[in-house]
Image (spheres, rainbow, N blue to C red):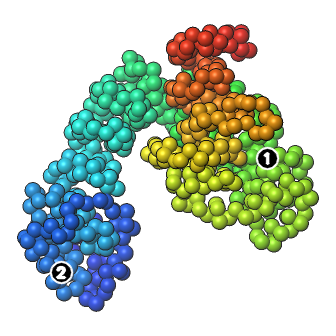
């Protein structure tokens, strides 16, 4: 390879020089060209014209590639073609399959990477538009690059997207780039984006505001005062997260002085659970009740991760936790200790005076980490039938837990549609990390299930052992059970959806969701079938919401049907916290 060519390849395409130099052996196979292959694997996208429609001039250009004597010559010819095609022809080549991107070899990788780079410079909107309509995996990286270079054009492009879901997804993916590139421009477009994205993309708009608060806190402070409540809350969350990152204790002090500080704090934890580690190191700085609220945000994993034994040995009752809060922390600590030191957990199972619930929790957590001999010895030491059953299921769970590495909405639903479904905590946690797109897919695929399967999924989610599924999915499942009540078991009083159990679940979810996203929670509650379940959910939601945002809570209560509104208002006036 000539020095000049080597220089142009390395710096124009970012390729490792060592790889191309190592390809000097003419007999080498392209299968050895592993650099970039993993990216090429993810580069599949649906393309348009069939190969039979290849124009004669294109065939001639491709023939020059095929006539190359060896791999190196073919790669050089491919790079030269990609770099010298007329700009006006780039879109046509990219939209074709004249060089098969799906072949996943180095030739395809180099060609399409070069074409994308050139189009991003010459006509980024055409490239992003093509990738958007073909659902290309490259869309979001390209869109972010475009938004960084030309934020105004990227914002204007959002107005041309007719599909609300795609518009919201694209806006979410470019928001951080926009906030860094031109925060003042993005701030000036907030009212426009509020109307453009609509209520269906409220989370996306809130994320845009949080990105702005991170990139330009002073601008957001100065301009957010007249925004709608939801956007002001998002701005406050972003600003508070900045303060917590600078100085956790000082940030907590600022939050505790705000009327809605606890709500902001739990909202931050819900989106960035890494703060839970700082929380664990600064428990003395937490106002009363905030640790319990933090646990409801779902970040207890991070709280106990570094030292689970500490939490099993601590006096949790002195921390102001409820019984449920203590059980949650202990359960999480047991699961963490099982993964870090299963022998220590075995010892504690023998020596600690744990109640039946804690023992079953330990037995259910340790099976995956025990050797075959340890598992057999554990089963031989047990006499309680329920403990033997729990330990046996746990010991047999390895293959199921290994499957969480590739957990998808489809595979989760397939398993939950089984009558004897028993999801591991690892799987629930994996689903809990999904972003808006995966959660939307989960909701759509659940809705598309046949009625019998949908009922099984909803039942297994509602009765799930760990209760850590994404909130929106829990809500969707509970709503289905309410709208499609199962017939009562023999000897059971007729009652919708399992009677008191489902009423308790609906009420609990409404209250907990109020800490994360009261707007979403109130929309869900309002959409539930009329009845005692909806009424009690409304009471619990309104009570929790009124703790930190009474005006917003009262506005929602006033929108309820007259009979329900009166009952909720009476409950608010007479509940212990409001007397």
Disc 2 residue crowd, few under 14, some 14–19, many 20+, Cα 10 Å: some
Name the mark nearer the viewer: 1 or 2.
2
Q: Quick one: 338 or 183, which is closer to the camera?
A: 338
Judging from the image, what secondary structure is the residue with disc 2 in? helix
Q: Quadrant of the N terminus?
A: bottom left
Residue 200: x, y in percent? 41, 32
Q: Is residue 203 left or right of residue 60?
A: right
- Report the residue at 23% width, 51% height from top: 130
- Report the residue at 38% width, 17% height from top: 226
Q: CA distance from mark 1 to mark 2?
A: 67 Å
Q: Is residue 509 visible?
A: no
Q: Is residue 575 left or right of residue 195?
A: right
| Residue 95 to residue 72: above or below | above
Residue indicated by mark 1: 312
- Point out which mark residue 91 bears: none
Q: Quick one: 48 or 182, which is closer to the camera?
A: 48
Residue indicated by mark 2: 66
Q: Is residue 271 visible?
A: yes
Q: Is residue 310 left or right of residue 285?
A: right
| Residue 224 to residue 274: above or below | above
| Residue 42 to residue 540: above or below | below
- Report the residue at 59% width, 39% height from top: 477
Q: Quick one: 186 or 438, which is closer to the camera?
A: 438
């Amino acid at each position: 390879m000539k020095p000049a060519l080597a220089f142009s390849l390395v710096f124009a395409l970012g390729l490792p020089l060592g790889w191309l130099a190592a390809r000097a052996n003419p007999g080498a196979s392209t299968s050895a060209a592993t650099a970039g292959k993993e990216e090429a694997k993810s580069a599949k996208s649906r393309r348009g014209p069939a190969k039979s429609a290849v124009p004669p001039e294109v065939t001639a250009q491709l023939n020059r590639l095929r006539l190359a004597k060896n791999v190196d010559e073919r790669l050089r010819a491919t790079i030269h073609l990609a770099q010298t095609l007329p700009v006006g022809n780039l879109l046509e080549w990219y939209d074709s399959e004249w060089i098969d991107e799906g072949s996943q070899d180095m030739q395809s990788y180099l060609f399409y990477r070069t074409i994308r780079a050139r189009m991003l410079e010459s006509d980024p909107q055409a490239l992003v538009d093509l990738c958007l309509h073909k659902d290309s995996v490259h869309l979001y990286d390209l869109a972010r690059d475009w938004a960084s270079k030309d934020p105004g054009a990227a914002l204007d492009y959002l107005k041309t997207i007719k599909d609300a879901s795609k518009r919201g997804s694209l806006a979410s993916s470019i928001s951080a780039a926009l906030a860094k590139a031109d925060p003042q421009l993005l701030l000036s477009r907030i009212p426009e984006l509020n109307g453009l994205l609509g209520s269906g993309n409220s989370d996306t708009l809130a994320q845009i505001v949080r990105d702005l608060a991170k990139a330009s806190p002073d601008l957001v402070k100065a301009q957010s005062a007249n925004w709608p409540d939801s956007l002001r809350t998002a701005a406050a969350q972003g600003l508070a997260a900045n303060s917590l990152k600078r100085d956790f204790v000082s940030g907590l002090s600022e939050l505790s002085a705000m009327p809605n500080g606890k709500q902001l704090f739990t909202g931050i934890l819900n989106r960035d659970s890494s703060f839970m580690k700082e929380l664990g190191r600064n428990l003395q700085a937490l106002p009363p009740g905030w640790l319990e609220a933090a646990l409801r945000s779902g970040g207890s994993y991070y709280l106990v991760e570094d030292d689970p034994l500490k939490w099993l040995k601590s006096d949790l009752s002195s921390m102001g936790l409820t019984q449920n809060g203590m059980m949650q922390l202990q359960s999480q600590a047991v699961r963490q200790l099982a993964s870090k030191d299963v022998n220590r957990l075995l010892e504690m199972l023998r020596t600690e005076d744990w109640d039946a619930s804690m023992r079953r929790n330990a037995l259910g957590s340790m099976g995956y980490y025990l050797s075959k001999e340890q598992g057999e010895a554990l089963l031989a030491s047990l006499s309680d039938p329920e403990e033997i059953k729990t330990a046996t299921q746990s010991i047999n769970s390895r293959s199921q837990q290994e499957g969480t590495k590739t957990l998808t909405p489809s595979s989760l639903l397939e398993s939950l549609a089984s009558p004897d479904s028993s999801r591991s905590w690892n799987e629930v946690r994996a689903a809990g990390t999904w972003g808006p797109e995966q959660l939307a897919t989960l909701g759509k695929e659940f809705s598309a299930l046949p009625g019998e399967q949908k009922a099984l999924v909803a039942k297994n989610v509602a009765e799930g052992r760990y209760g850590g599924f994404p909130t929106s999915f829990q809500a969707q499942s509970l709503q289905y059970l309410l709208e499609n009540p199962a017939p009562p078991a023999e000897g059971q009083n007729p009652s919708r959806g399992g009677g008191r159990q489902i009423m308790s679940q609906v009420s609990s979810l409404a209250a907990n969701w109020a800490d994360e996203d009261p707007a979403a929670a109130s929309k869900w509650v309002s959409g539930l079938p009329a009845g005692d379940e909806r009424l009690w959910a409304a009471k619990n939601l309104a009570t929790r919401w009124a703790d930190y945002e009474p005006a917003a809570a009262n506005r929602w209560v006033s929108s309820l049907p007259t009979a329900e509104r009166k009952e909720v208002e009476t409950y608010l006036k007479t509940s212990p916290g409001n007397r």
